[in-house]
Amino acid sequence: MRTKKLRFEPLIAKYEEIAEEAFIPVSDGTILRVLRTKAPEETRNDFTLFLIPGWSTAVISWDKVLSEAMKFFDIVYFESREKHSSTLNMKTKNTLDRISEDVKEVVRHLELDEKSMVILASSWGAIFLADALAKKKINPHLVALSGTTAKLTLPKGTRHIIPFTPPFIFTALKPILRAWLANRKSEDEEQARKILRNLEEADARKWKKVVKYSMMDCWDLYEQIEQNTIIFGAELDKMHNFEETRRIVRLVKNSTYVDMKTNKNSHTKNVVTELRNHLKTM
């Protein structure tokens, strides 16, 4: 296998420099970070975009979407409990139900109007959002799913050993994970560097605590979604199985499919254009 020689350089999102940071306590004592911005009066559309990124994803991955969306939407960028920004209650059993409860509690804490809320969730974020929707914990105006999957995407052979592996092993395996991400799961150098920042920020203790209870397939959750849903797919996406996306499109009854071709295109302002156009049809 030919190895890509990438020098990791931390990438800082423009949105991170602009947004207001808040740390929100949830009912088990864990504290989660959100980033917020308000749309300008002259261009706002009176909707809130609640963005839930994927597993251990850094803000830089969504910077182009956020930079465009903030012109029209109030934004809440939600970071789930496996991310480096959380203060995790290490005694909690981080079941899918507990993690989806975080979404409900943050929405309530921020006093968001669900009737004017658009939730965009990606990959792992789509899984626990689906749990929240299936259990009727929240009821947004529009649901948008990107990089949809029914289970966490992990390197081959690691799925069943991670829950039993001491955290220091993850640190030792980082070079292998870096090579896997750069060579097998990236479309180009830009995407690779974004993913590598995600890995640099990874907290092995949190990964182990969260992934332990999140190993199951979750197909049944998607067929219980009742909200108007737009699903962004990308046939050339190396991070997510496109056949899983096809299956999820069939499971979500009230869904519209949009082909973004590549993972990279699924993280551009084109996503915002599609969301705005879809809202006009509702």
Image (tube, rainbow, N blue to C red):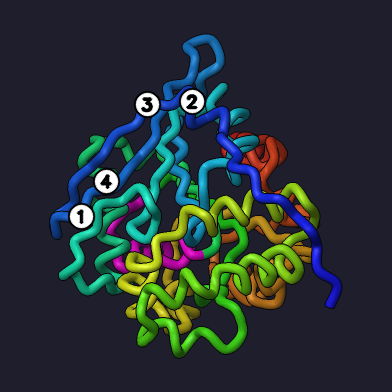
**Mark 2–mark 4 contact, CB under 8 Å?**
no
Toward the right, the furthest residue is 2
Residue 247 highlighted magenta (yes or no): no
Say what amino acid the circle numbered 2 marks: Glu
> Which residue, given by chain and number where applicable, does mark 1 sit on?
30
Residue 132 highlighted magenta (yes or no): yes
Q: Residue at x 52, y 42 (%)?
A: 59
Please give the label number shown on residue 106: 4
The residue lying toward the viewer, choosing from 29 and 67, is 29
**Mark 2–mark 1 contact, CB under 8 Å?**
no
> Which residue, given by chain and number where applicable, does mark 2 sit on?
17
The correct choice, above or below, for 31 with respect to 89 in the image is above
- Of label 2 and label 1, which has the lower sequence position? 2
- Of label 1 and label 4, which has the lower sequence position? 1
- Of label 2 and label 4, which has the lower sequence position? 2
Q: Is residue 36 left or right of residue 102?
A: right
Kindly report the distance in space between the C-alpha atoms of the residues bearing marks 2 and 3. Answer: 9 Å
Q: Nearer the viewer, mark 3 or mark 4?
A: 3
Label 1: which secondary element: loop
The answer to whether any part of residue 131 appears in the image is no
Label 2: which secondary element: helix
The correct choice, above or below, for 81 with respect to 172 in the image is above
Q: Residue at x 34, y 31 (%)?
A: 21
Could you tell me residue 207's position as x and y percent?
Answer: 39, 68
Say what amino acid the circle numbered 4 marks: Val
Please give the label number shown on residue 20: 3
Secondary structure that dominates the magenta span = helix
